[in-house]
Amino acid sequence: MTDKKTTDNTLAAEIPAEEAKNPDVSTIDACISHAREIKDAQLELIKSKNYDFAPEFRDLTIQLYLLGVMWKFAESLGSNVENARELAFSALQTMMIQDKLQKQKALKRIEFLRKMSKLEDDHNALAVAIGYESEPDDNSLAEVFDHYVDDLQVSGAFWRLYDRGKKIMLYGGLGIAFLVIWFITLFMPGNSAIAILAAGLISAAIFVIPVFLIGVFIYHTKLKKTKQAS
């Protein structure tokens, strides 16, 4: 009888000791598992809404939302979590690495998210606050995105316009520079290499600058119309 009690006590002592070796890892794994479940459920709920946001903004918003989700979940795990918010950042970083993001890029991303998670008045960003207050199977992620539906600066249409503008400036400028260099080399021999290169660069700038100014004008026009409509 005594031997049995001793054995039971030894086993009971060994189990917590084993778990205590690395409590943060198990907590982080639990946070990640919870966050993935919430993310999958929320993304399924917003499919029908057909949001059109810039990819960078969409990813940033979801990551901040998951930070709030994991923050609250870490607090619910008990008193062994000394700093639930910091643990949520660690879990989010680990989650990014698990999703094949390089470690250095994940570190930089977390530093960026750390800055974006707080407003100037030290309040939590909207996505973080709503993620923290979210409940299972609610429409909390949609609630976040609904705040930005009419914001031109984060719209997918504006992002595509910006992306096309960059490509037009890059490839157009290179094309113009190549044509000018080719023309001068072929039909105006005798010029120095520096003069030919300078002519190509000036020609590229003559093309790029007006395209850039037109893009800025279109942006400000659309932004003004959006503000007037709102």
Image: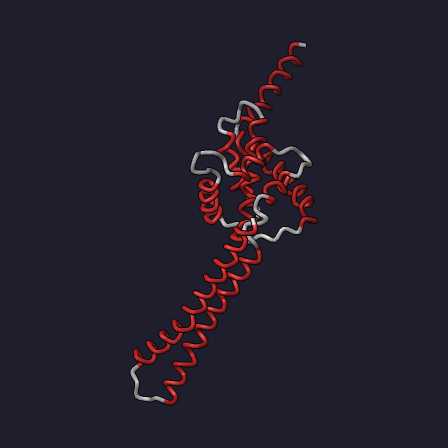
Q: Quadrant of residue 17?
A: top right
> In the rendered view of the protein, which quadrant contains the N terminus?
top right
State the residue in front, 218 or 228.
228
Report the residue at 54% width, 26% height from top. Answer: 20
Q: Is residue 140 left or right of residue 218?
A: right
Q: Is residue 138 above or below residue 112?
A: above
- Measured as percent of width and height from the top left, residue 120 is found at 43, 38
Q: Is residue 8 left or right of residue 207?
A: right
Q: Residue furthest top?
A: 2
- Measured as percent of width and height from the top left, residue 72 is found at 57, 31
How many badges with numbers are in the image? 0
Q: Is residue 209 left or right of residue 149?
A: left
State the residue in front, 230 or 190.
230
Q: Quadrant of residue 204?
A: bottom left
Report the residue at 58% width, 43% height from top. Answer: 147
Q: Is residue 99 above or below residue 2?
A: below
- Measured as percent of width and height from the top left, residue 103 is found at 48, 47
What colour-coding does the image apply?
A: secondary structure
Report the residue at 38% width, 81% height from top. Answer: 181
- Measured as percent of width and height from the top left, residue 82 is found at 49, 26
